[in-house]
Image (cartoon, grey):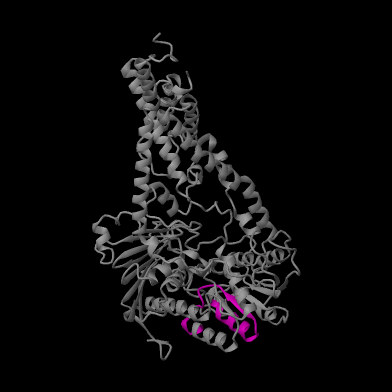
Amino acid sequence: MKNNLSGNDAYAGSQLNGLVLLRVLIGWHFLYEGVSKLINPYWSSAAYLLDSKWIFSSLAKTIVSNPTLLGISDFVNMWGLTLVGASLLLGLFSRYSALVGMGFVILYYLFAPPFLGLEYSRPGEGSYIIVNKNLIEACALWVLYAFPTGHVIGLDRFFTK
Amino acid sequence: MSENNNMDRRELIKGLATVPVFGLFLVKLWQKMRRDAIKKSNILSNLVQENSAPAVIKSLSDSRHLNIGIIGYGGRGSHLVRGAGFATKGWTDTVAENAKKNKLDKQFETYMTQEDLNCSIKGVCDLFDVRANQGLDASKNEIRPGAKPRSTATRYLHYTELLANDEIDAVIVATPDHWHARIAMAAAKAGKHVYCEKGLTRTFDEAIALHDIVKETGITFQLGHQNRQVEANEKAKQIIRQGLLGKINLVELATNRNSPWGAWVWNIHPKGNAKTIDWDTFQEPSPNKFPFGEEALKRFFRWRCWFDYGTGLSGDLLSHDFDAINQIMDLGIPKYASSTGGIYFYKDGRDVPDVWNATFEYPDKDLTVLYSATLSSNEPRGNRIMGHDATMQMGGQSGGGSIHGFIVTADSESTQYKERLEQGIINTKYPIYTYSPGSKQIDGVTSATSRYFANKGLLYTYREGKRVDPTHLHIKDWLDSIRSGSQPKCNIDVALHEAVACHMATESYFQGRRIEWDPKKRALV
């Protein structure tokens, strides 16, 4: 019974609390990242993309040099982050949004990975080699996908009856 | 029944357990937006009146086709001719190829989307055969913004022959400085409109003479300071006029370069020889004469290194920064100038200094303008306008760093912003105004990262999808002024300010003393 993740009491109390807390915190983070871009009429993904290094740098340049692609990139980022954030926070379709959110963060990681020898003009907020907060957040979202909680604490509960 | 109710309630609570967190998020978001709004209303964005004129004025190009002659088709001359819409096949091929290799290289696109200025290059005069032929090539290259060229250029061996062509309406003078005055004055007398590269002239006397002839003949004269078209300078002017920097007593202008190219050690063209270069004509107006040979070749291709042909840092680089600050602050000619310097790094036979500092005094304005230049350090000092209430840091016009816009930061001891500083609404660590080209954003509350990008001019540049070359706008301004009979932005009056200020500083370097400007006698004392 304990291993049946779709059950109501799949987790012990502290396990459940920890997972829900993780989901809410990541949801909050995504939501604000998205909303702050939505309310800033001047925000653009161009700056991040222009500073891209490694395998996706030429793709990044293609996006920046094409106004249509850049528009799509901006739109997907702003709304994607906002929706994933709200979904995780409220526990609505949260298993799928954990997966989508993981996709976002992995892309951010791959567009600017903290590898030795890659120098960024953007000032960093910490010190990283290979592992940075994006990678950790992606991993945490994987955990949330593997151990879903929306159906226990969250709006998913009303849909999984 | 009550057990079922309890079950339902527990279900509901579990399902909605995180909704209050969402509510908390919305409350905090609203608080933050309100806080930012209050902060914003207290920074310069609200104090600055948004009424600047658009950078591109209404087009007059349709009204009248103009035939242009180019005298001096070198590095700068070819750029100016491109500004008029004509580039060599070699150049268009190269930049088209670059654009294919690097999608962010917009040089070709910028050129091809330039406005067609409805003009032709009718005459080319250059003392070096290779350059003259390149000019002819540019005049007929069909890869250009707008329709195919209407006519192609004729080469003239001497500028007097070019000026004798009645079909030519206007000339661009991009020769070395020692030829500027003679050619521009002859052109004005021949009724041709003149676009002359900076520095205006090689000597003070020439500047006065040229000014008077332009005034007498009434031709349309434009000096080649394309910074006059840069919107950042107009915005800076607006902010200073509104007194937002407080009383300004010191302005610091700087040039930092650190490469042989930046120090005018340009390539000697392999095809340059006694047959392809008209050396005698080149050195005709210069004080010292040299026979054709190795020294002559150096002097021909690296003329900026000698006072025989120009004025070194003064006419080449100070002139840009001086004109920019004159544009921003309407300074006019200083009362006093003094300068010192030396040849400290490039001991290659040049006679112009490579480290040079000049001060300009404006006693009636309670202002000193300081200019400091070195050709052996790339430290991006930029230009600073220091007021009692705030400082404006600008990128500078000549190798002064990568900031193409400017930032305004409040002074910790400011009187004007005292209350706001005390309340923490204004912080001296962050700009109260950031201007970055292509951006309409005026903001003091964006994140450190976006500020960083804004300062580098990286943000929004590609957003609008179109970049414009200020040199093109400057040529356009000149041609439009010819058509409308109005004065271009860098007309002969402001050109004289630049020329006299620069010559005062150069004279001071020669004489080792402070030079005074006598506005009544129009003389240096």
Q: Is residue B382 visible?
A: no
Q: Is residue A107 visible?
A: yes
For the point 41% across and 91% down, the residue is B520
Which x, y percent locates residue B66?
69, 75
Q: Nearer the viewer, residue B189 or B206?
A: B189
Which x, y percent locates residue A48?
48, 43
Choose top left, top right, bottom left or bottom right for residue B421.
Answer: bottom left
For the point 73% across and 79% down, the residue is B167
Question: Can residue B230 be found in the magenta stretch?
Answer: no
In the rendered image, the residue lying farthest to the front is B1
Which x, y percent locates residue B395?
43, 60
In the rendered image, the residue lying farthest to the top is A1
Quarter of the image that includes the N terminus of chain B = top left
Question: Can residue B193 be found in the magenta stretch?
Answer: yes
Compared with residue B337, is residue A84 higher up or lower down, i.e. above or below?
A: above
Q: Which residues are magenta?
A: B178-206
Left or right of B226: which side holds B246? left
For the point 48% across and 71% down, the residue is B306
Left or right of B355: which side holds A71? right
Q: Nearer the viewer, residue B75 or A151?
A: A151
Q: Nearer the viewer, residue B418 or B359?
A: B418
Label total for image: 0
